[in-house]
């Protein structure tokens, strides 16, 4: 059996890569992918501890979180496509206002 500490280390590494992507990169799509990477790091923790503690609630919460993340990506990609079509902007620094 794989120790839980390996899962924790993996999720910490993924979470830190996601934080670095959000803070250092200015491309909106990369920032969205970095947020999803952070959500998946949290999901790894939930699933690992649910397996380790023999509790089904963590796995149910992971499925719920994945469902919400999919809805969030759909909405965010819709907004990004509208921004690119209307303003030709993919850089977060170029978005100074969201007024029409």
Image (spheres, grey):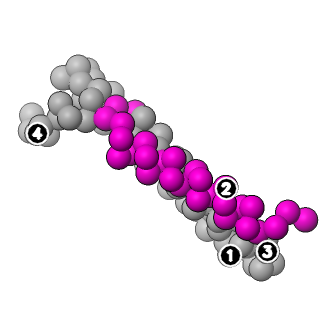
Mark 3 closeness class: few <14, some 14–19, many ≥20 residues within 10 Å: few
| Element assignment for label 3 | helix
Residue span colored magenta: 1-29
User: Of marks 3 and 2, which one's residue comes earlier in the chain?
Assistant: 2
Report the residue at 43% width, 42% height from top: 21
Report the residue at 17% width, 30% height from top: 94
In this view, the residue in front, 97 or 57, is 97
Mark 1 closeness class: few <14, some 14–19, many ≥20 residues within 10 Å: few
| Element assignment for label 2 | helix
Q: Which mark is residue 10?
A: 2
Q: What separation in Å lies between label 3 and label 1 (alpha carbons)?
A: 12 Å
Mark 2 closeness class: few <14, some 14–19, many ≥20 residues within 10 Å: some
User: Of marks 4 and 2, which one's residue comes earlier in the chain?
Assistant: 2
Q: Nearer the viewer, mark 3 or mark 2?
A: 2
Q: Nearer the viewer, mark 1 or mark 2?
A: 2
Q: Is residue 60 above or below residue 38?
A: below
Residue 17 on the magenta span: yes
Q: Nearer the viewer, mark 1 or mark 4?
A: 4
Q: What separation in Å lies between label 4 and label 2 (alpha carbons)?
A: 37 Å
User: Of marks 1 and 2, which one's residue comes earlier in the chain?
Assistant: 2
| Residue with the mark numbered 4 | 97
In this view, the residue in front, 95 or 62, is 95
Report the residue at 67% width, 72% height from top: 58
Residue 77, x across and y down, in percent? 39, 35
Residue 14, x across and y down, in percent? 58, 51
Q: What separation in Å lies between label 3 and label 4 (alpha carbons)?
A: 47 Å
| Residue with the mark numbered 3 | 52
Residue 78 can be seen, yes or no: no
Report the residue at 38% width, 45% height from top: 22
Q: Nearer the viewer, mark 3 or mark 4?
A: 3
| Residue with the mark numbered 1 | 57
């Amino acid at each position: 059996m794989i120790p839980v500490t390996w899962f924790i280390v993996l999720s910490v590494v993924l979470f830190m890569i996601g934080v670095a992507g959000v803070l250092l990169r200015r491309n909106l799509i990369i920032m969205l992918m970095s947020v999803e990477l952070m959500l998946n790091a949290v999901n790894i923790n939930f699933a690992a501890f649910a397996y380790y503690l023999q509790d089904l609630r963590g796995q149910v919460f992971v499925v719920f979180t994945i469902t919400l993340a999919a809805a969030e990506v759909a909405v965010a990609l819709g907004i990004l496509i509208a921004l690119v079509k209307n303003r030709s902007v993919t850089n977060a620094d170029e978005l100074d206002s969201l007024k029409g």
